[in-house]
Image (tube, helix red, strand yellow):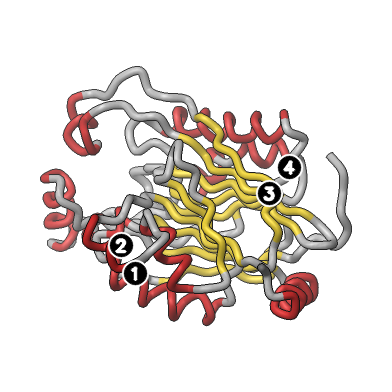
Amino acid sequence: MVDVQSASTSQERARDAGIVVASHNTMHGVFLGDLIERYRALVPQHRVDVLCLQENVPLSAEQAALRANAGTHAELFSAELGEFQCVCLPEHPALATLIRKAFVLEDAFLVPLPRLERLNWLERLYIRGGKVTAKYALICVIGDDTQRLTIANFHLETAGDNAHRRRQIAAVASALRERGLLHNLVACGDTNAFSWSRSGAVQVIAELMQPLQALAGATPKTDGKATHYFARQREDLLPHRIACMVGRLGVDHPLPYDVICSDLEALKSGKVQTEESDHDLVYAELRWPQARTTG
């Protein structure tokens, strides 16, 4: 049962100030314990209401034994933070969205994204399993007594080019249009939008997210600073280890992979350096819409 006083306080804050949405790629929770401590400090500091997570994975048997009713890292984070509900659909648990219980979860569903037909030889080296896998976006519709908000959490394809990733965003926009979710949209996640030019990376992101601008007038609210670092890519695949080693030798190529995109006004935004992952966490405080709309 939701604490009525807590819910009322959270909703008043949301209407008077804004709703804070954050996004983070957890690097498969390689440093799970450190991430728990990070989120414990970060969530109250930035008053986070929604935390979109990518690369969520199941707990090991040993980890699961320490926490009842938690099957994945995201569910563990939710339990440790308290006052959050974890939306993680079994068809694609790699995406998870943590939402304060003060907000009502009205709907949650997955959007299948276009798949590559095959991987080239280089992609087979650094893609886990060396195979094309299904990709999705996780959509959550949340609300209070005044309005509803659509949260789209995504992790676009690492393989392929930016044109392919743009098609994936277009699929998200198309699914939202079909359901009439045309306003009050927050889309966030890991774009994997590669650019050889660091100065041109912001434009690459804008072009990638354009289908959401056409749908709802949603534009990037993050500042375009780098969020991904090869030097912090400490997973077990050999290409990841090589990329990490090269990055630590100074040949890194940091890019703004992570983005928050919305049609709502941004009151502030920023990023938090998170050494526990190869991605920094990004967040934005968005003005809570005042009157419920239809369609």
Residue 282 or 34: which is nearer the viewer? 34
The three-letter code of the residue at mark 1 reads Leu
N-terminal-most mark, 2 or 3: 3
Query: Would residue 183 appear left or right of 41 to someone viewing this image?
Result: right
Q: Is residue 70 above or below residue 238?
A: below
On the image, the x and y values in percent for residue 186 come to 64, 52
Determine the CA span between mark 2 and mark 4: 31 Å
Determine the CA span between mark 4 and mark 1: 33 Å
Residue 155 or 76: which is nearer the viewer? 76
Determine the CA span between mark 3 and mark 1: 26 Å
Q: Marks 2 and 3: which is nearer the front?
A: 3
Q: Which residue is mark 4?
A: 216
Q: Which residue is mark 2?
A: 277
| Local crowd size for mark 1, using a 10 Å CA cut-off: few (<14), some (14–19), many (≥20) | some
| Local crowd size for mark 3, using a 10 Å CA cut-off: few (<14), some (14–19), many (≥20) | some
Q: Which residue is mark 3?
A: 141
Query: Would residue 269 appear left or right of 36 to someone viewing this image?
Result: right
Which residue lies at the image location 46% right of the left edge and 54% below the top edge? Answer: 258
Determine the CA span between mark 2 and mark 3: 28 Å
The three-letter code of the residue at mark 3 reads Val
Q: Which residue is mark 1?
A: 35
Are the residues tagged 1 and 2 within 8 Å (C-beta)?
yes
Q: Marks 2 and 4: which is nearer the front?
A: 2
Q: Secondary structure at mark 1?
A: helix
Query: Would residue 145 appear left or right of 61 to someone viewing this image?
Result: right
Which residue lies at the image location 55% right of the left edge and 37% below the top edge? Answer: 110
N-terminal-most mark, 1 or 2: 1
| Numbered label attached to residue 192 | none
Query: Would residue 119 appear left or right of 48 to someone viewing this image?
Result: left
The three-letter code of the residue at mark 4 reads Ala
Which residue lies at the image location 83% right of the left edge and 62% below the top edge? Answer: 145
On the image, the x and y values in percent for residue 83 come to 57, 72
